[in-house]
Image (cartoon, rainbow, N blue to C red):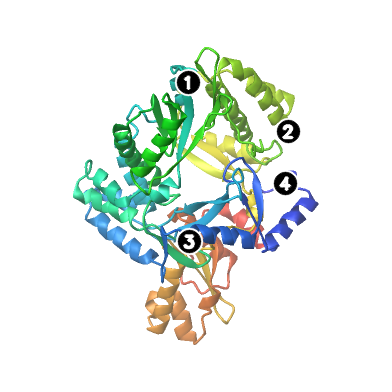
Amino acid sequence: LKNPRKPNDNLTGAERRALRSLKANEALTVLPADKGNAAVVLDTSDYNRKIAAVLEDKAYRKLKKDPTDAIERKTVLLLKKSPFAEEVCQQLRPQGSRPPRLYGLPKIHKLDVPLRPIVSTIGSPTYRLAKHLAGLLRTYTGNGPRHVRNSMEFVHTLDSLHVDPHDIMVSFDVVSLFTRVPIKDTMDLLGRHFEENILRLFRHVLTTSYFTFNGQFYEQTDGVAMGSPLSPVISNLYMEDFEERALDLAPHKPRCWFRYVDDTFVIWSHGPDKLQDFLNHINSINQCIQFTMETETEGHLPFLDIDIYRRPDGSLGHRVYRKSTHTNLYLNAASHHHPSNKQAALSTLVHRARALCDQDSLHAELVLLKDVFKKNGYNNRQIYRVLNRRPNISRPEDKPGSVAFLPYVGTIFNRISRVLSRHNIKAVGLPPYKLSNFLRPVKDSLGLRTPGVYSIPCECGKVYIGQTGRSVDTRLKEHQRHIRLEHPDKSAVAEHSIELGHRIQLQNTSILATKTRYMDRIIREAIEIELHPGNMNREDGFRLSKSWKPLICSLKN
């Protein structure tokens, strides 16, 4: 650790300059495509215009102020009244909540490249509660014969199906399902499974969908948010009831109906005219739930990531489906990731090929993957190893006592890992930087609305180093109040200002590190106190062990 060798740089100077130029250019927005592993460069004005078009939908309404604090308080109150055990409530209780943020992913496979709206809800007031409720509800969904769990399970269903020459393979897709799910109807369905004390929590999560974009707060008036852990399960619950009613009332019924969330595979035996009547029928059940339809072309129909095709004997074949816009870009061999991550990326694609392709298609898919791996920088030896790897034989292994997540630095990670393994600690390497770290973020900046370690400067040059599990913004208001009310005993910042008559520059507060875990915060706070000897702190914070001293001395120098 004292004398580590720096890993070889895998970006050239020209590439770094290009990334800095892209980051500095506010007229351009760079973001990942919705599908296909592509990077998309948009004019920022076009990106904002497309987001504005999304927000014109009647499902969204502007709010006058940030509702985060109010929703957090109500969440805490409802948890106190809930039937959950105290330790569960403690885990679900929000602290230092930040507002959900809207961004869009370009659908490059569609005309005019519309955006798929995504709401990042991690850290929001109801995120933990939504995740817990999703776990409770999952027991009651996905148990019917029409439910598709995943594409690998669905190919086994396809193997049992047979189509006649006059049959039509069809896929139906619900338009913007998540934002169209009727909350009132869904609450009625939830009432069949849960008591009122749990229903209150569902109602709270489902009716407090909000987000921020470009500093403006919006409320979602109906439907569930794209990005909430509860949304897919709620959508499944509603669609299971919807399809039962729609199929029961249909004058002509499909031979089979298999649905994965908002995508449905159907075999239709009643001709094209009756098929259009069926589409009109399912679109008449609820004006919020509208379907689009795609029929097979030359005996092929894409569904999920499967290309389903007819065989001459009436059975159905299947192989991996890729959209025409797919780039075949995966984790590059030159990327600074742990070798096991790269091996897993290749193994996953090979496993998908073996799981989704029938025997007639498997060879062609593996030949394609071999070419894809080469284009992503892998050599023949690595490719041979992954293509000929035998399935893992399960054997009992000693589980590690704990896991340490460390930044992956190739020149020293293995040595640290070996030391930790002697103490029954498994080391997991995380890539310290990704290309996205060098680009301007597309989500709204949180500013001080995040927990972590912060610095408050004084006009005299000294700083106060603090940490909080709530938002730094909330803690800053408390410091400000203690100064105004002259409470030196409640804040070192107030004590410094009152006793010396100095002006605290609260407006210049900066976040030194965004940390949510308590131990991460107090260790980082102690390090920053060491690095800022001219501070106004009354205490030195957490007592660091001697093992930190070499690192701190290095940082000081």
Secondary structure state at the residue bearing disc 1: loop
Q: Amino acid at mark 4?
A: Lys
- Image quadrant where one finds the C terminus: bottom right
Give the spatial CA distance, label 4 vs label 2: 27 Å
Crowd around label 2: few <14 · some 14–19 · many ≥20 (10 Å): some
Q: Which residue is mark 3?
A: 56
Is tag 1's residue or tag 4's residue first in the polypeptide sequence?
A: 4
Q: Which residue is mark 2?
A: 375
Q: Which residue is mark 4?
A: 6
Give percent across and percent down for residue 326: 64, 38
Q: Amino acid at mark 1?
A: His
Residue at image location 28% in from the left, 53% down from the top: 203
Q: Which residue is mark 1?
A: 166
Give the spatial CA distance, label 2 vs label 3: 42 Å
Are discs 2 and 3 less than 8 Å apart at CB? no
Secondary structure state at the residue bearing disc 4: loop
Is tag 4's residue or tag 2's residue first in the polypeptide sequence?
A: 4
Is tag 2's residue or tag 3's residue first in the polypeptide sequence?
A: 3
Is tag 4's residue or tag 3's residue first in the polypeptide sequence?
A: 4
Which of the two marks, 1 or 4, is nearer to us in this view?
A: 1
Which of the two marks, 2 or 3, is nearer to us in this view?
A: 3
Give the spatial CA distance, label 1 vs label 3: 43 Å
Is 139 situated left or right of 18 in this image?
A: left
